[in-house]
Image (tube, rainbow, N blue to C red):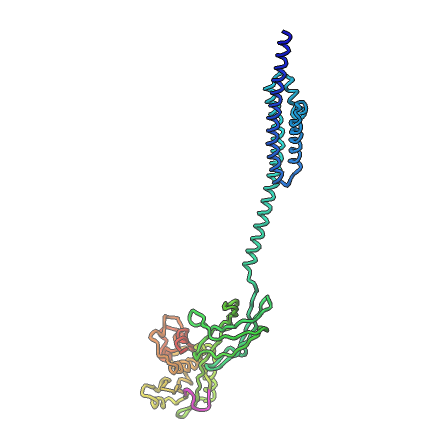
Amino acid sequence: MAFDRTTERTRRERALSGIALRAALRLLAAVAAATVGATGLADVASARPAATASAASAGSVASAASAGSVASAASAGSVASVASAGSVASAGSVASAGSVASAASATAASATVATAETTAMAETTATAEAAATNEATAASALPAARQSIAAGWSGSRSLDIGESIGLSGRVKNADGGAAGTVRLDRRVGETWKPVLRKEVGASGRWSARITPPHTAGPVRYRVAYVRGGTAVASAELPTLSVFRVNTYSIETRGKLVADVDLFARQAAATYADSRGWARAYQRFERVRSGGDFTLVLAQARTLPAFSSNCSTQYSCRVGRFVIINETPWRKKTPAFTGDLRTYRHMVVNHETGHWLGLGHPANGCTGRGNRAAVMMQQSKGLKGCRFNAWPLDREAAAARG
């Protein structure tokens, strides 16, 4: 019986040793797995100290296991003390759980630190890359060089048809270069039409001389700075005013009472007034003889000699002759309600308007109280309109020619 009890005790001790060894091996496997995870995280986190500590703990258990000493292994995982408690399975489970839990906690801590740092690094990198991209985009949106062009007319912007005018300017680049072409465009309807090109040297300065079209009226130009076939800068110039010059001479007919010199001065003042046919870009210059038309101050009885359509009561225009009847010149007509000086402006503008090609309008009075058209026969009546000595907008536009 003693032999049997000794044998049984030996068998139990061996069983317990086997259980303890298996528990230690399971613990070793669990810690090794945790070590691998910690080592991997340590690589991501650039070998942080927390991961290194976990690996060291696993190393201690591995050394104990390889030595085959369960007691040494117990010092790492407390397996022996659990076994001595008499519940090997439960104690082994608890011991394994405790060891794995410790390793898992260390691993989780390392993972959390590594993940947080990696995320922070990734976000910082992403933000930096995004900022760099935005800066690059903003930089690429800016022109490589800022160009400018300045230009101006030399002399008066009021020209007669056929006259030329000087134009000069300078182009500038932020990059210091200036080579390129200056293009002059003229406004035609709703578009800009190129009319001149001028090469620009290194100084950036340029000049040109142009002659506007032979048409009375405003003319708009702009200059464009062209580099590589593309207009990189442009500026519109002040508008030119191109006038048609009409020359006239003065003659008289019959025996006159009116002051001819005063007549000449007042007629010239009417022609020069900005409210008159100058609005149609018509300019008038007196010459000693001849000219484009003849302004005549005539005694009333001589008017029918110019044409049977001319009356002794009113003024008249026949061909190149613009004939002013002396009688109303001195007294105005009864139907005209304005003063004498206004009448004189009106009659000169009216008869000269005929010479410019305008007739009597069908709607000379567009409504009671409105200004009468200067081409309306105001000497005969106003039809409810107010007297008016100057061309209306539509009349000025029609006389531009």
In the rendered image, residue 290 lying in the magenta stretch gets the answer yes
Task: Name the quarter where the C terminus is drawn.
Answer: bottom left
Quarter location, residue 331: bottom left
Closer-to-camera residue (316/40): 40
Q: What is the span of residues highlighted in magenta in the rendered image?
A: 286-293
In the rendered image, residue 129 lying in the magenta stretch gets the answer no
Quarter location, residue 307: bottom left
In percent of width and height, residue 168 lies at: 55, 76
Q: How many marks?
A: 0
Closer-to-camera residue (81/377): 81
Quarter location, residue 394: bottom left
Q: Is residue 221 left or right of residue 129?
A: left
Whether residue 149 is visible, yes or no, is yes
Q: Is residue 301 left or right of residue 228?
A: left
Q: Is residue 5 left or right of residue 371?
A: right
Task: Name the quarter where the N terminus is drawn.
Answer: top right
The residue sitting at 46% across, 91% down in the picture is: 288
In percent of width and height, residue 262 lies at: 47, 87
**Residue farthest to the bottom?**
255
Residue 172 sits above or below residue 377 on the image: above
Whether residue 339 is visible, yes or no, is no
**Residue farthest to the front?**
3
Closer-to-camera residue (303/92): 92
**Residue farthest to the left?**
308
In percent of width and height, residue 72 lies at: 68, 24
The residue sitting at 49% across, 81% down in the picture is: 164
In percent of width and height, residue 97 lies at: 60, 25
